[in-house]
Image (cartoon, rainbow, N blue to C red):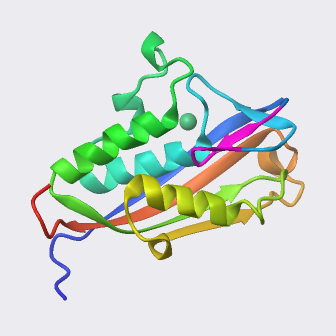
Amino acid sequence: MTYDGLRIGLGHDTHRVGAGGPLRLGGIDIPSDLHLIGHSDADVLLHAVTDALLGAAGLGDIGDWFPDTAPENQGRDSTEMLLDVYRAVRKQGYQLVNLDCIIFAQRPKLKDDKPRIRDHLARLLEVAPDRIGVKAKTGEWVGPVGREEALMAECVVLLAPSEKTP
Ligand code: MG
């Protein structure tokens, strides 16, 4: 294996928590009495994934692509944004090797939702589920996550040159 052309990318995002569910996370609706607040649908995990992909491909950040001042991005489905970006990443000649992410949420407990989120991300990114890692941590009752004021997400991706022309 050659390591030429491998690219790593890092993404992070934070969104405030509001009362009333469901919770849109990783492109799926999770039953909860909380939701996330933002200009788009506020899917904190997809935003971190999107930023990681953009960083790895040298394509800027999610704010460059989808400004939160643009009316067309109001309430926008983050799945659309992720797929737009992923198309551009593949057009640059890259394929996803693997992705690893962490969701920081004091509540709800995501233990049973992690496999569903992983499978959904794998479908969106057209890779096998074993190339996607989804972890969840609480905020240990401290900081904005622990006080249930916000959810956060972090993501790293590894890209490699595509084997076939996109
Ligand atoms: Mg965001």
147, 90: nearer the viewer: 90
Number of numbered labels in the structure image: 0
Return the residue nearer the eye: 68 or 144: 68
What x and y, as percent, mark residue 68? 49, 21
Placement of 140 over or under 37, stated as above or below:
below
Which residue is found at the position 75% from the left and 40% from the top? 150
For image coordinates 66% across by 56% down, the residue present is 103
Farthest left residue in view: 165
146 falls in the magenta region: no
Q: Quadrant of residue 24?
A: top right
Quadrant of the rendered image containing residue 19? top right
Residue 114 placement (x, y as % from top left): 68, 63
Quick check: 39 left or right of 63?
right
| Residues shaded magenta | 21-29
Q: Tell me where residue 10 appears, x and y as whole percent.
A: 43, 57
Q: Residue furthest bottom?
A: 1
Which residue: 49% across, 70% down?
Answer: 129
Ligand 1 in which quarter: top right
**Residue at (81%, 34%) from the top-left corner?**
21
Give the quarter of the image for residue 13: top right
Is residue 85 in sight in this rendering?
yes
Left or right: 13 in relation to 33: left
Identify whether 127 is placed above or below 47. below
Tell me residue 35's x, y (percent). 76, 34
Q: Quadrant of the N terminus?
A: bottom left
